[in-house]
Amino acid sequence: MFKNFFKRKDISSELNKKSLLERNLSLVSLILLGIGAIVGTGIFVSPGIIAGVYAGPATILSFLVAAFVCMLVALCYAEFSSTIPIGGSAYVYAYSTFGQFIAWLVGWSIIVYSMISTAVVSVAWSSYFKNLFNLNFRTRFDVIATILILLLMGFLLRGMKDSAKLNNTMVFVKFFTIMFFVGIGIFFIKKENFFPFIPKVIIDNSGIKHYGLLGIISGAASSFYSYLGFEVVATTSEEVKNPKRDVSLGIIISLAAAAILYILMSTVLVGIVNYKDLADPSIQSYSAAYAMKIAGKAWASNIISVGAIAGMTTVALLNLYAGTRLVLAISRDGLLPRKLSKLSEKNKVPVRATIFVAIVTVIAANTLSLDSAIELVSSCALFVFAIVSIGVIFLRYDKQFKDLEKSFKVPMFPVIPILAFASCILLMAQFKKFTWIIFLICELIGILYYLFIGQRTSQLDQKNNN
C-alpha cells in the first residue's frame, strides 16, 4: 500500500515532452492574469471584516503581514516555475521533490480550495447582483451563482485566449473602480478613525480575543484569502510564450501590484468608516459601497457595486481555470481518471476536466456556508504554500535539477524559504478549532482516495511495473 509514497516524477523526460496546449500568453497577459486572480472578492469584502473583527485601524498592518508572507512564498514559486516550466504548479513541484504521496496531498488541497473558492466568489457575486438590482427573492438553489459558473465554464471551453481577453477587460474595470473609490474616499477620511491605531484587546461572548498585536496576526491569517490567486500564474506554464522568464516575473509583479491596491483600499475604508461600525456583519459584506453611502455619495456606491461584480467575475473565472488545469495535470498522471485529461480537437482545452470542475463547483456553491468555506480555503492554501516553500531547499540541492537552467533563484537562500514555511505555519495556527477539524477531514478523504484508488491507477506506478 505504501510502495509509491516516495516515487518521484522524472522532470527531464517531462520537459522533453511537447505540450498540446497553445502557447499564446505574454508577460503582460500573465501580470493581468495574476492581478485578475488576486484582486477580487477580498478587496471589496475583507478590509471591512478584518477592521471590524480582528485588527481595527491596524488592518493595514494585517494586509502588510499577509503580503509579506505571500511575497516570500511567491519567490519560492518563482524559482520552481523557472526551473520546472510544466503545467500543474505546486502539484508538479511536490511530485518532483517529495514524491507521489505529498504531491497528491498538495494537488488534492489545491483542487479543494480552487473549487470552494470559486463557489464562494460565485455566491458573493450573486449577492452583489441581487443588491444592485434590488432582487429580494431567496431560494435554496442559488440560480444566479449557478448561471455564472456555467457561463464561465463556457468561456473556458472556448480556449484560454478568449478567457484572457475577458480577464484583461475586467481587470481594467476593477482597477478603475478601486482608484475611483480611493480618489473620492480620500476627501472624506476622518483622522480620528485611525485612533487608537491598535485598539486594546477585547473578548467577545464566545471567548475569542480581538484587536491588539494578536488581532493583527489573526487578521493577516484571515486576509490571506484575499491574496490567493498569484499561484494561478504558475499553472499557465504550458500556455506561456516564454515560461522560463515570464512566469516568475508575472507572479512577483502581479502580487506586488495587488498588495499596493489592498493597502490603499483598506486605508481609505478605515479612514471613512469607524472600525467599531465595521463589526456589524451586515455592513462587512459591502463595506466599500457602505463607505460611499455614509460619505453622502449614493451614486458612487452603485458604481462600486458594479466594479465589485466585475472583480469577482475575473476571480471566479481564474479559480475555475486553475482547478481545471490542475485536474488535467493530475489525471495525466493517472491519480485521477485519465479520461479527464483528454483535450478537444478544436480548441485544445480539457473539456471533460472543465465540465467536471464546474459541476462540483455548482454543488459546493449551493451547499456550503460562506464563513467556514473561506477559512477552509485559506487553510488548504497555507498548507500548499508551506510545502512549496520548504521544497525549494530540496530543489536546490537535488542532483536531478542540477543541470536544469534557472532564470530565477530565491535570494538569501535558505533563509527566505525557511521563513516562508514558518510564516505559513504561524498563520495556520490562528484558525479556529472547527476550521482545523474540517481541514483534516478533507485531507483524510484525499488520503483514503489515494491509498485505495489513486496509487493503483498511477501512470508512474504502471511504468515502474513494466
Image: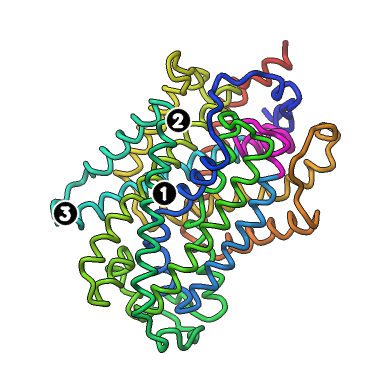
* Residue 242 sits inside the magenta stretch: no
Which quadrant of the figure contains the N terminus? top right
Which quadrant of the figure contains the C terminus? top right
Q: Quickly name the residue at label 1.
A: 171
- The amino acid marked with disc number 2 is Lys
| Among the 4 quarters of the image, the one containing residue 330 | top right
Magenta span of residues: 79-103
Colour treatment of the image = rainbow
- Of badges 3 and 1, nearer the viewer stands 1
Please state the horizontal and vertical placement of residue 430, each as a whole percent of the image.
Answer: 55, 65
Q: Quickly name the residue at label 3.
A: 133
Q: Quickly name the residue at label 2.
A: 161
**Label 2 secondary element:** helix
Q: Is residue 261 left or right of residue 64?
A: left
Q: Give the crowd class for mark 1: few <14, some 14-19, many >=20 residues within 10 Å.
A: many
- The amino acid marked with disc number 1 is Val
Camera-nearest residue between 60 and 220: 60
Q: Main secondary structure of the magenta part?
A: helix
**Label 3 secondary element:** loop
The alpha-carbon separation of the residues under discs 3 and 1 comes to: 23 Å
Q: Is residue 148 left or right of residue 132?
A: right
* Pointer 3 or 1: first along the chain: 3
| Among the 4 quarters of the image, the one containing residue 278 | bottom left
Position of 361 relative to 44 (above/below): above
- The amino acid marked with disc number 3 is Phe
